Image (spheres, grey):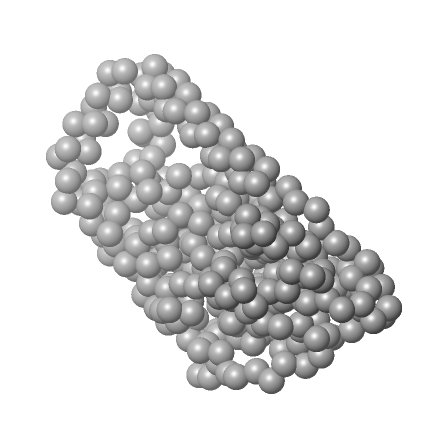
Amino acid sequence: MEETIRFLLLHGYVVLFLSVAADQLGLPVPSVPVLLAMGALSGSGEFSLAGALPLAVLGCLVGDLSWYELGRRRGRGILKFLCRISLEPDYCIRHAEEAFARRGPKVLLYSKFVPGLSLVAPPLAAMFRMRLRRFLAWDVAGSFLWSGAFIGAGFLFRAEIEQVGALLLRLGTEVFALLAAALVCYVAWKAAQRWRFLRRLRVARITPEELNGKMEAGEDLMVVDLRHPLEFDADRVKVFGALHMLPEELAKRHQEIPRDRDVVLYCTCPNEATSAMMTRRLHRLGITRVRPLAGGFDAWVEGGFPLEPKMATATPFEGS
């Protein structure tokens, strides 16, 4: 334990930068305790706030710019990847889209304080064509706010933090075993929560090939596009003949959904989360001939099936 503290005192700035960068890249590295410790050590004169805060912000930018660039190059695919590796449920994309729709780029000011939003905000900003200069301005401000909040808390409460540190020194390895056990329990709980969520999505799906065959055969059916308006405008195309409707509208206007024909719902969520949840809701309302599109909109596009253009308005992120 004492060797660890000596190492931190010798390499504190490097540890700060690497831990923050790793955290923002999505690695399981807790950077908040390091920020608090750096604030406390700055208060005792071991380090400088003027050196610590810019390094923490730089660490944030390393992670955020990496995800921004991946979002620009890979688009929605990188968002799905982030939600799949996250312990948060798959609708994290939808929540992030709603946050951007309400707040615009201001989301970047507080995204780092919200679990699940911190990782998806940078690629989502790129996906909706936020200019790099504008992204950097808001992201730097948010990084200063987040880093400064924890470094400042460490500085102000350095006496309490020093007491905790002294207690940890006395407890030695026992406290680390306790923390490791708590971490394992937390991960197990989140994994069980995710398993229950995925279990609720188990409904019969229709493949893009099946849907296209029905459309070519002239079958009377309804296709509903459940994508968020921001995403709908960004793609600028939809499944041929699809009606765009928000999930909340679908629940309220279920009387408009025909009971005597097949209804197909599609979205762009991992595991078709939104479509599957809306399908189950409509089943409970007595609309039984409804199924999600397997693979969602992406699978339809990848299969080369018919699309039609959608006249798009500018997203709130376009421009300078």
* 154 lies above or below 164: below
Identified at 45% across, 57% down, the residue is: 95
Tell me: 281 left or right of 168.
Answer: right
In percent of width and height, residue 269 lies at: 59, 56
Identified at 31% across, 38% down, the residue is: 33
Q: Is residue 70 visible?
A: yes
Identified at 49% across, 78% down, the residue is: 315
In percent of width and height, residue 76 lies at: 61, 62
Locate residue 311: give its quadrant. Answer: bottom right
Identified at 47% across, 63% down, the residue is: 252
Frontmost residue, 252 versus 197: 252
Frontmost residue, 127 versus 264: 264
Q: In which quadrant of the rendered image does the C terminus lie?
A: bottom left
Frontmost residue, 164 versus 268: 268
In percent of width and height, residue 290 lies at: 66, 55
Q: In which quadrant of the rendered image does the N terminus lie?
A: top left
* 61 lies above or below 164: below
